[in-house]
Amino acid sequence: MKIVHLSVAFTFCVILSSCLTVRPEGRQSWTGRPVADLEKHPLFLTMALVRTRTSDGVEIRNYLNSRGVTTCSSGGAVFRDVLNSTEYSNFANCMQNVLACSNLFYISNGVVTEYVPIGSGGRSVTLTNVCVPVSQLPPILIKMG
Protein backbone atom coordinates (compact mmCIF):
# COMPACT_ATOMS: atom_id res chain seq x y z
CA MET A 1 0.00 0.00 0.00
CA LYS A 2 2.90 2.36 0.77
CA ILE A 3 4.25 1.80 -2.75
CA VAL A 4 0.95 2.95 -4.26
CA HIS A 5 0.94 6.08 -2.10
CA LEU A 6 4.57 6.83 -2.97
CA SER A 7 3.82 6.30 -6.65
CA VAL A 8 0.87 8.70 -6.52
CA ALA A 9 2.92 11.28 -4.61
CA PHE A 10 5.81 10.96 -7.06
CA THR A 11 3.47 11.39 -10.06
CA PHE A 12 1.90 14.47 -8.45
CA CYS A 13 5.35 15.99 -7.78
CA VAL A 14 6.46 15.36 -11.35
CA ILE A 15 3.36 17.12 -12.67
CA LEU A 16 3.86 20.10 -10.37
CA SER A 17 7.58 20.36 -11.05
CA SER A 18 7.18 20.32 -14.81
CA CYS A 19 7.25 24.13 -14.61
CA LEU A 20 9.83 25.27 -12.07
CA THR A 21 12.12 28.09 -13.16
CA VAL A 22 12.36 30.67 -15.92
CA ARG A 23 15.70 31.76 -17.28
CA PRO A 24 15.74 35.51 -18.04
CA GLU A 25 17.69 34.98 -21.29
CA GLY A 26 14.91 32.69 -22.53
CA ARG A 27 12.26 35.31 -21.87
CA GLN A 28 14.35 38.11 -23.36
CA SER A 29 15.18 36.10 -26.49
CA TRP A 30 11.65 36.78 -27.80
CA THR A 31 11.76 40.57 -27.41
CA GLY A 32 11.99 42.23 -30.83
CA ARG A 33 11.24 39.02 -32.76
CA PRO A 34 8.66 39.10 -35.56
CA VAL A 35 5.37 37.47 -34.64
CA ALA A 36 5.88 35.09 -37.59
CA ASP A 37 8.69 33.41 -35.58
CA LEU A 38 6.20 32.75 -32.80
CA GLU A 39 3.54 31.47 -35.21
CA LYS A 40 5.96 28.97 -36.76
CA HIS A 41 7.59 27.73 -33.55
CA PRO A 42 7.19 23.93 -33.29
CA LEU A 43 6.33 23.96 -29.58
CA PHE A 44 3.75 26.75 -29.65
CA LEU A 45 2.07 25.18 -32.69
CA THR A 46 1.04 22.32 -30.41
CA MET A 47 -0.52 24.49 -27.69
CA ALA A 48 -4.00 25.95 -27.33
CA LEU A 49 -4.04 29.67 -28.14
CA VAL A 50 -6.25 32.32 -26.52
CA ARG A 51 -5.95 35.92 -27.73
CA THR A 52 -7.07 39.32 -26.47
CA ARG A 53 -6.26 42.94 -27.24
CA THR A 54 -5.66 45.85 -24.87
CA SER A 55 -7.37 49.23 -25.26
CA ASP A 56 -4.17 50.67 -26.78
CA GLY A 57 -4.03 47.95 -29.45
CA VAL A 58 -1.45 45.57 -27.97
CA GLU A 59 -2.29 41.96 -28.82
CA ILE A 60 -1.80 39.43 -26.03
CA ARG A 61 -1.40 35.79 -27.07
CA ASN A 62 -1.65 33.14 -24.39
CA TYR A 63 -0.18 29.81 -25.51
CA LEU A 64 -1.40 27.34 -22.90
CA ASN A 65 0.36 24.19 -21.77
CA SER A 66 -2.39 22.34 -19.92
CA ARG A 67 -4.54 19.26 -20.19
CA GLY A 68 -7.37 21.05 -18.39
CA VAL A 69 -7.67 24.11 -20.62
CA THR A 70 -10.97 22.89 -22.08
CA THR A 71 -12.51 23.26 -18.62
CA CYS A 72 -12.47 27.04 -19.15
CA SER A 73 -12.89 27.17 -22.93
CA SER A 74 -16.66 27.83 -23.07
CA GLY A 75 -17.11 24.93 -25.45
CA GLY A 76 -14.10 26.00 -27.52
CA ALA A 77 -15.33 29.58 -28.04
CA VAL A 78 -12.18 31.09 -26.47
CA PHE A 79 -10.04 29.59 -29.24
CA ARG A 80 -12.03 31.00 -32.18
CA ASP A 81 -11.42 34.74 -32.07
CA VAL A 82 -9.84 37.60 -30.15
CA LEU A 83 -11.59 37.86 -26.78
CA ASN A 84 -12.76 41.18 -25.39
CA SER A 85 -11.48 42.18 -21.95
CA THR A 86 -14.50 40.75 -20.08
CA GLU A 87 -14.32 37.39 -21.88
CA TYR A 88 -10.57 37.15 -21.30
CA SER A 89 -10.96 38.10 -17.63
CA ASN A 90 -13.57 35.35 -17.17
CA PHE A 91 -11.25 32.86 -18.90
CA ALA A 92 -8.24 33.92 -16.79
CA ASN A 93 -10.24 33.71 -13.55
CA CYS A 94 -11.36 30.19 -14.43
CA MET A 95 -7.78 29.15 -15.31
CA GLN A 96 -6.56 30.12 -11.82
CA ASN A 97 -7.93 26.78 -10.64
CA VAL A 98 -6.44 24.75 -13.52
CA LEU A 99 -2.93 23.31 -13.45
CA ALA A 100 -1.34 25.15 -16.41
CA CYS A 101 1.58 27.11 -17.79
CA SER A 102 0.46 30.21 -19.69
CA ASN A 103 2.96 31.68 -22.15
CA LEU A 104 1.88 35.31 -22.58
CA PHE A 105 3.29 37.17 -25.57
CA TYR A 106 2.67 40.90 -25.93
CA ILE A 107 2.71 41.97 -29.59
CA SER A 108 2.78 45.46 -31.14
CA ASN A 109 3.07 46.19 -34.86
CA GLY A 110 3.84 42.54 -35.66
CA VAL A 111 6.73 42.36 -33.15
CA VAL A 112 6.93 40.58 -29.78
CA THR A 113 7.55 43.22 -27.12
CA GLU A 114 7.47 40.96 -24.06
CA TYR A 115 7.18 37.30 -23.07
CA VAL A 116 5.79 36.46 -19.62
CA PRO A 117 5.29 32.81 -18.59
CA ILE A 118 2.83 32.37 -15.72
CA GLY A 119 1.81 29.27 -13.81
CA SER A 120 -1.68 28.66 -12.46
CA GLY A 121 -3.43 26.11 -10.29
CA GLY A 122 -0.34 25.81 -8.09
CA ARG A 123 2.08 25.39 -10.99
CA SER A 124 5.15 27.53 -11.47
CA VAL A 125 6.74 27.96 -14.89
CA THR A 126 9.72 26.39 -16.67
CA LEU A 127 11.41 27.65 -19.78
CA THR A 128 13.78 25.34 -21.64
CA ASN A 129 15.78 25.88 -24.82
CA VAL A 130 12.80 24.56 -26.78
CA CYS A 131 10.91 27.78 -25.95
CA VAL A 132 13.40 30.16 -27.54
CA PRO A 133 13.05 31.28 -31.16
CA VAL A 134 13.97 28.50 -33.59
CA SER A 135 16.87 30.58 -34.95
CA GLN A 136 18.46 30.43 -31.49
CA LEU A 137 18.12 26.68 -31.00
CA PRO A 138 21.24 24.53 -31.04
CA PRO A 139 21.53 22.71 -34.42
CA ILE A 140 20.63 19.32 -32.91
CA LEU A 141 17.28 20.68 -31.66
CA ILE A 142 16.44 22.25 -35.02
CA LYS A 143 16.98 18.90 -36.75
CA MET A 144 14.73 17.17 -34.23
CA GLY A 145 11.95 19.78 -34.57
Image (cartoon, rainbow, N blue to C red):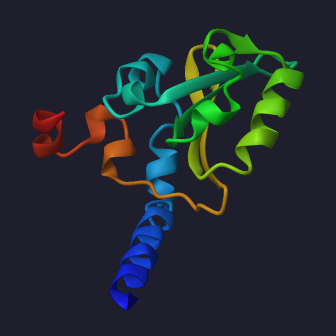
Vertical comparison of 5 with 54: above or below: below
Q: Is 67 placed above or below 25 here?
A: above
Is residue 34 visible to the viewer in this orientation of the structure?
yes
Q: Quadrant of residue 113?
A: top right
Residue closest to the eye, 18 or 140:
18
* Residue closer to the observer: 120 or 118: 120
Residue 72, horizontal then vertical, whole percent: 69, 33
Residue 1, x across and y down, in percent: 38, 87
**Quarter location, residue 125:** bottom right
Q: Which residue is drawn at 63% across and 14% down?
A: 109
User: Picture coordinates of residue 115 (x, y %)?
Assistant: 58, 41
Please determine whether, in this image, residue 83 is positioned above or below residue 10. above
Residue 127 point in image, percent of width and height: 44, 54
Is residue 113 visible from the viewing direction of this image? no
Q: Quadrant of the C terminus?
A: top left
Vertical relation: 67 (above or below) 72: below
Is residue 44 rendered to the left or right of residue 28?
left
The residue under the point 66% across, 9% down is 81
Q: Is residue 129 left or right of residue 12?
A: left
Q: Which of 61 and 87 is in front in this view?
A: 87
